[in-house]
Image: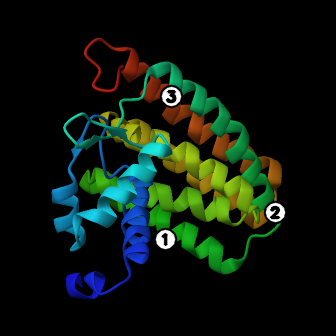
Amino acid sequence: MAGGLRSLPRDTLRDRVYEGLRNSLLRGSFEPGEPLTVRSLATAFGTSPTPVREALQQLVAEQALTAEPNRSYRIPRVSRETFLEVRDIRVELEGLAAANAAAHIRPATLRRLELAVERMGKAIRSQDLKTYLAANQAFHFIVYEASGSPILLRTISSLWLLIGPSLNMLFSDLELVEGLQDQHHAVIEAFRRGDADAARRAVQADILAAGMHIGRQMSEPGSSTSS
């Protein structure tokens, strides 16, 4: 794999590194405050430092990363106020995307959603945080892709870049995470009925419940995500 990557044009390498890092941020693979170095990422991607540095700089421009004085980078610590503001915007936009998706849903898409929920259930039982977060992100973006609106999808994605790492705080309450599965199932059932309003409500309830929990944690003294 590494040799194949090195043989690609630099622009293509930069794009692949960028997409890999971007997807990791969306999935919560990184945690708030986590440092990133060009050298370690170049080793992980099997490429030279240049495309990695360019990809990191692009993510800094998108405010998904912060640049450090020592030429390293860091996952930002989102303030509680920013997180809650993003949550409220997500409620509206992602609810709209879910409602729109109800008119376009296909059996194959429903099956992908079911598989994502199954993966989340297995991850909860094994207390596998990273697998849960990856499956959760996959579930939500299957819904939003089904909305048929590229602009809406891009806007939602930009918001997830900001809060994806903060979703690591969800697993501090397994009972809550198990309860969120009810909303995921409700989304699927709403799609089966073609009920746009029910799909909107289920997605919004999911975001609000998760956001309330994370917001409470951010307000606690010593919270790792407070600014």
Left or right for 121, reference 37? right
Residue shown at 35%/84% (left/top)? 8
Comparing labels 1 and 3, the label whose residue is closer to the camera: 3
Residue shown at 50%/45% (left/top)? 62
Q: Earlier in the sequence, mark 3 or mark 2?
A: 3
Q: Dividing the picture into quarters, in which one does residue 91 lie?
A: top right
From the image, which quarter does the C terminus lie in?
A: top left
Q: Earlier in the sequence, mark 1 or mark 3?
A: 3
Mark 1–mark 3 distance (CA, rounded to whole Å) = 29 Å
Q: Answer few, some or many: residues within 10 Å of disc 3's Cα (few below 14, many 20 plus, some between 14 and 19).
A: many
* Percent position of residue 208, x then y: 58, 32
- Residue placed under numbered mark 3 in the picture: 83
- Residue placed under numbered mark 1 in the picture: 115
- Residue placed under numbered mark 2 in the picture: 194
Q: Answer few, some or many: residues within 10 Å of disc 2's Cα (few below 14, many 20 plus, some between 14 and 19).
A: some
The three-letter code of the residue at mark 1 reads Leu
Determine the secondary structure under disc 2: loop
